[in-house]
């Protein structure tokens, strides 16, 4: 291998610089690939003397014991990668279960109170039209969400933060609308799936059969804010009411 020793005073420095640039160009892709493939560093066991130990169980790998596989912890509970049956069960529960019907009723009642769209009136037939449209939004959103989940191998099941402070519970509820979890280890990553699925229903319904000036995709985009609000409200209900709450001693 040739070194960058000068053969003459005029060409030594340019050759050395070119050689170094070529070496860096060859190494950078390998370094980047290696960094991307590195797994998450395991979180050490919790220690009562560390101020950050109270939060280490949010997303951690519990060290293996007795040659048993390491247990992945998500929001302080063991994480099990979802099977297709688990994803379909979550789809039916969130779309056609109690939470799905509750969100549908809340959105229909909100539209009824505002008299939107005005072409449907504010009598019982008008509420029926709003309720049916809201139910269609819930069904479309859930179906798109399930399809993208399986396509991108994501886990969009909501996992309440067990024993977390109010701050972390609220963060968990908000982040669920812009993130997903890898099916393999539950690691949270940014994802467009929740946002796309929540916009899909309102856009399709507004374009398909809403009356008058409300029958545009833009109106569907605007009305999607109610979908986001009801979903986040459902998450907060699970965090603070349905999930037993334990206050953290460390913030």
Image (tube, grey):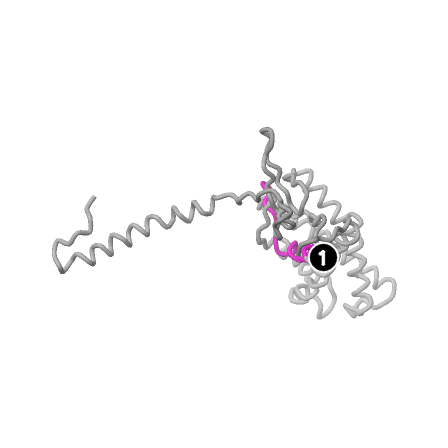
Residue 107 occupies which quadrant of the picture? Answer: bottom right
Camera-side residue of 198 and 19 = 19
Q: Does 16 appear in magenta?
A: no
Camera-side residue of 112 and 9 = 9
Residue 43 occupies which quadrant of the picture? Answer: top right
What residue range appears in magenta? Answer: 168-185
The residue at the far top in this view is 66
Q: Which residue is mark 1?
A: 166
Residue occupying image coordinates x 59% and y 41% = 61
Helix, strand or loop at label 1? It is: helix
The residue at the far left in this view is 8
Query: Is residue 148 among the parts visible in the rendering?
Result: no
Vertical placement of residue 209 versus 98, above or below: below
Camera-side residue of 26 and 106 = 26
Where is residue 203? Give x, y as percent.
Answer: 67, 61
Vertical placement of residue 64 versus 116, above or below: above
The residue at the far right in this view is 124
Camera-side residue of 220 and 104 = 104
Q: Quadrant of the N terminus?
A: top left
User: In the rendered view, does 219 fall on the left or right side of 28?
Assistant: right
């Amino acid at each position: 291998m040739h070194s960058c020793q000068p053969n003459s005073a005029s060409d030594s420095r340019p050759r050395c610089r070119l050689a170094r640039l070529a070496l860096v160009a060859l190494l950078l892709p390998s370094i980047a690939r290696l960094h991307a493939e590195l797994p998450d560093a395991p979180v050490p066991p919790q220690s009562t003397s560390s101020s950050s130990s109270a939060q280490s169980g949010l997303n951690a790998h519990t060290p293996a014991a007795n040659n048993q596989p390491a247990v992945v912890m998500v929001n302080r509970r063991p994480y099990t990668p979802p099977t297709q049956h688990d994803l379909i069960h979550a789809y039916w529960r969130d779309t056609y279960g109690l939470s799905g019907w509750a969100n549908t009723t809340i959105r229909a009642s909100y539209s009824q109170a505002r008299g939107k769209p005005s072409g449907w009136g504010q009598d019982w037939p008008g509420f029926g039209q709003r309720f049916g449209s809201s139910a269609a939004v819930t069904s479309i959103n859930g179906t798109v969400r399930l399809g993208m989940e399986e396509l991108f191998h994501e886990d969009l099941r909501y996992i309440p933060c067990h024993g977390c402070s109010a701050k972390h519970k609220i963060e968990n509820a908000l982040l669920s609308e812009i993130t997903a979890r890898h099916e393999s280890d539950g690691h949270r990553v940014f994802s467009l799936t929740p946002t796309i699925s929540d916009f899909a229903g309102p856009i399709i319904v507004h374009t398909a059969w809403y009356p008058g000036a409300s029958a545009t995709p833009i109106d569907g985009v605007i009305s999607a804010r109610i979908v986001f609000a009801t979903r986040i409200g459902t998450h907060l209900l699970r965090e603070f009411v349905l999930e037993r709450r334990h206050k953290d001693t460390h913030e």
